[in-house]
Amino acid sequence: MVKTTNNPGRIVAVQPAAAAPGSNDIRDIKQPVEIPSGWGWLGWTFGALALAAILALLWRWWRRKRALPPVVPVVPPHVRARQRLQEALGLLSDPRRFCIAVSDALRVYLEERFQLRAPERTTEEFLQDLQSARELDAAQKQSLADFLAQCDLVKFARFEPNEAALLELHECALRLVDETRFEPLDAGAPSPAAGVPPS
């Protein structure tokens, strides 16, 4: 026997109570038994599909993130040159090693900044190539020639300048780096011409 309830869409089957053996009496009916409507499985299916899709997307994102190389910030040549020149100050007590460190820092900077093949060339070869280079103006070329000549005197002629002369060489190298450094254009940043000292 099927009985409808006040809840639309809900069907309740009513089973008559079993009569006692040997009795023809009518017994009270049993409690209603709920029959599933058949739509519950659809919700579970959609839920499982949505969970599977989310897990697949998370797996792809995680694999893609693992496959990407880590982003390494690019340090500009002038920053590296200033770091090398700062480290060279620790060698002030040894003029020869100090001049080697300072001139190497400047030569490496010029190669990184202007692609001038400076480190593996002699001073004469480098200065000869520098004459046709457009990257430096005449004053900078002369300053660089004087700087390298002074460093060569210390490195090869056993000349021992005092600390003030060594610091002047260091300042000359820093000045050349600051004058020729490359800065990306930034609309919000003030230009060096506005009186901002170089970092």
Image (cartoon, rainbow, N blue to C red):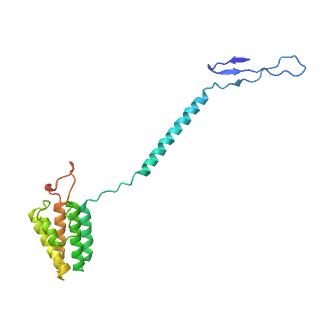
**In this rendering, is residue 64 above or below 180?**
above
Residue projecting furthest to the left: 138
**In this rendering, is residue 161 above or below 61?**
below
**In this rendering, is residue 158 above or below 22?**
below
Identify which residue, 15 or 52, lies in the foreground.
52
- In the rendered image, which quarter contains the C terminus? bottom left
The part of the image, by quadrant, that contains residue 126 is: bottom left
Side of 84 relative to 179 (left or right): right
Question: In the rendered image, is residue 164 in sight?
Answer: no
Q: Give me the residue at 71% from left, 18% from top.
A: 2
Count all numbered tags in the image, as a single digit. 0
Q: Give me the residue at 18% from left, 79% from top.
A: 154
The image shows residue 7 at horizontal and vertical percentages of 63, 20
The part of the image, by quadrant, that contains residue 4 is: top right
Identify which residue, 15 or 78, lies in the foreground.
78
Question: In the rendered image, is residue 91 in sight?
Answer: yes
The image shows residue 115 at horizontal and vertical percentages of 21, 61
Side of 138 relative to 183 (left or right): left
Residue projecting furthest to the right: 22
- In the rendered image, which quarter contains the N terminus? top right
The part of the image, by quadrant, that contains residue 125 is: bottom left
Q: Give me the residue at 26% from left, 77% from top.
A: 91
Q: Give me the residue at 13% from left, 55% from top.
A: 193
The image shows residue 44 at horizontal and vertical percentages of 58, 33
**In this rendering, is residue 117 above or below 40?**
below
